[in-house]
Amino acid sequence: MNKLQNRLILLSTSLVAGAAIMLSWFALGHFERELPPAMAKTVAVVGQSTAKVIESAYAAGVPPESLVGANDYLDTVRKDNPGLDYLAIASPQGTTLHRSDNQNANRPPLPINWAAPDQSLVSTQRLGTYFDTTTPLRAEGQVVATLHLGQRASIVESKVKELSYDVLTVLIVATLIAMELLRFVLAVSVQGPSSLLHDFLHRARQGDFRHYLPLGNAVGVGRLNAPLNHWQNLINERAHQIWQRLRARGEAGADDKIPAIAGFQFHAPQASVILRDSAIDYVRWPFFLLIFSESLSLSFFPLYVEQFFSPEWGVPRELVIGLPISIFMFVWALSMPWAGLWGDRVGHRRAFMVGAIITCAGLLLTAATQTIFDLVLWRCMTAFGYGLVFVTAQSYIANNTPPSQRTKGMAIFLASFFAGSLSGAAIGGILSDRIGYPLTFVTSALLSAGTALFAARFLHSAPPSAQNAKRKLGSADFKALLRNPKFVVITFLAAIPAKIALTGFLYYSAPLYLKFLGNNQSATGRAMMAYGLVIVGMSPSIARLADRFGHQRWFVAVGGYVAAASMFLIHFRDDAVGVALAITFLGIAHSIGVSPQLALVSEFCQDVVKEVGLGTATGIFRLIERLGNVLGPMIAGILIAKFGFKGAFYGIGILCLVCATLFSAYFQMSAYKERHRTAGP
């Protein structure tokens, strides 16, 4: 079934992507054809007003070739309209009479004799590296001269290139969304109902007729549920009739329960059991959608915060901009232990819905923010709901996958998280350029509300049981783990530096620096998308290699060194491409070094993990790891205020380099001592 499902997803996604590519191709061609005439319209008013001045001079008896100060006048018009690169007045035969052009422009010289176009109408044609718009100058019903206004053709090329990048971004994101949505649709219509049908028929084959199929999701294979339930109900009714006859003859017991008859099992009246399927794909789509919605602001959030800054506070601007991000990460980290306990008590469905609604409210209020203090408060609310959904989805996957497939389940969880994150960052950059920051936050809130509806419709929570109860974290657990040197080294020299680089560089510094370089939000979103694409593409393969070869500490160390190297790439290329390369290499670093960290804790800290329990050790490790999320923007903000953007990048790189070196040295020394101890005297 999984193989068939994957093939259907691949086929459907390929068809969607192919159709989108064809549509985009035609749209780009249409855009390229229609943009020059649209550009001509933007200078038509300038041309008409300039033409009226020259025509008025001719009416006063001054022909165009005799105009005094015409070049100065054309210079003034050109400077008032930066989109124009030149203006020229030519005779009807095409000889240049007067001209004004940008002498600093890197371009070939303008022609002395202009090609004579159709002089009856305003027209636009390609002239070398320009689009030349010609306006006829008339007097007494005759064309006495022509006015030429030039715009660089590179403007069109840059617009087409920018639009092409946006279209490519949308295609990638649309493909990811289509894959996630198709998984969900197939789970609801095929995989889930088929799994339930298999369970139902297996029970019936064993003689157990007490269970029924659900009728709520009667789509696809689920359409068989109603007739099968009807026959199941008839079988139980006949069993009840037989039981009543047996009781009337005195051959049955005195109780009212339906016992096994001839080895078959039946339910008592009004005591049937509905089978429920808890496929992990049911939570994958709403989780992806919520991560997508919250990530729409990643590419512009520091810029959104910047508009609330006031120099009167006496605090560095960079530190204030990073504060809401740090507080968001802090509240997110603190909410997760409580959210996990509460979610296990009330059930995944209710916990997911509450988290999505809180996130929706936080995003709506963020859109209406008036001061920095409001913004911090609403981001705390958003972080609380976000953390609740994050932990609930993780718990749902863990509780609905067998132990042998739990690693695969967590890989699915991370894939959905990073796919939603990269998709949201890319689309959010495009949206903010076109509809502004507040409306982008409103869009995020509406999508978050949609995830609550999906959870209400498709998630089903098993009743809480003693097996799902979690022991509360205690100070003794923290003390036991923090007394273990290897746990401290892994956490503080590997996990925390990785998170500092993630939030300090990717979420905070990179958007600000790209804006500083003159890039719009669409370009910022595309650059940030590279991190998620690398994580989604490389992380599962590298995780399998780490499990196959062992020596996870090597992978963690290499990841730290690659992260450090990524911060220094800006030294060799100080532009948007350099930032995109740094983001890409950071994604490679985290693909290599982040996944094996938890396995390293289990391998090298076995004694203390056994003492506090694997779940508790994992929770504490993840909680302390979030300290890096909190510190990242603050460290980056301080470094930017003191040393500028490059200094901040170098500072984060040096931090990663030092931590990776100390990490490697510690485990190398530990391995040496272990070999020496094993070898004996």
Image: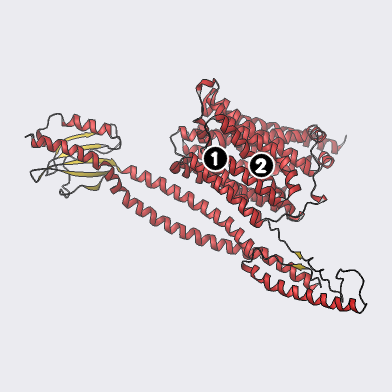
Residue nearer the viewer, 59 or 22 = 59
Q: Quadrant of the N terminus?
A: bottom right
Please, is residue 259 above or below residue 673 in the view?
below
Amino acid at circle 1: Leu
Residue at 82% from the left image edge and 77% from the top image edge: 241
Q: Position of residue 549 (x, y in %)?
A: 71, 48
Q: Position of residue 32 (x, y in %)?
A: 34, 51
Tell me if mark 2 has few (under 14), some (14-19) or many (20+) residues whose alpha carbon lies within 10 angstroms of its own: many
Q: Secondary structure at mark 1?
A: loop
Residue 572 visible in the shown view: no
Residue nearer the viewer, 493 or 625 = 625
Amino acid at circle 2: Gly
Q: Earlier in the sequence, mark 1 or mark 2?
A: 1
Q: CA distance from mark 1 to mark 2?
A: 17 Å
Residue at 28% from the left image edge and 48% from the top image edge: 37
Kindly check if marks 1 and 2 are in contact, taking CB atoms under 8 A apart as contact.
Answer: no
Tag 2 residue: 387
Q: Secondary structure at mark 2?
A: helix
Residue at 52% from the left image edge and 60% from the top image edge: 14
Q: Which mark is residue 298?
A: 1
Q: Is residue 573 left or right of residue 452?
A: left
Q: Position of residue 570 (x, y in %)?
A: 51, 33
Residue nearer the viewer, 621 or 582 = 621
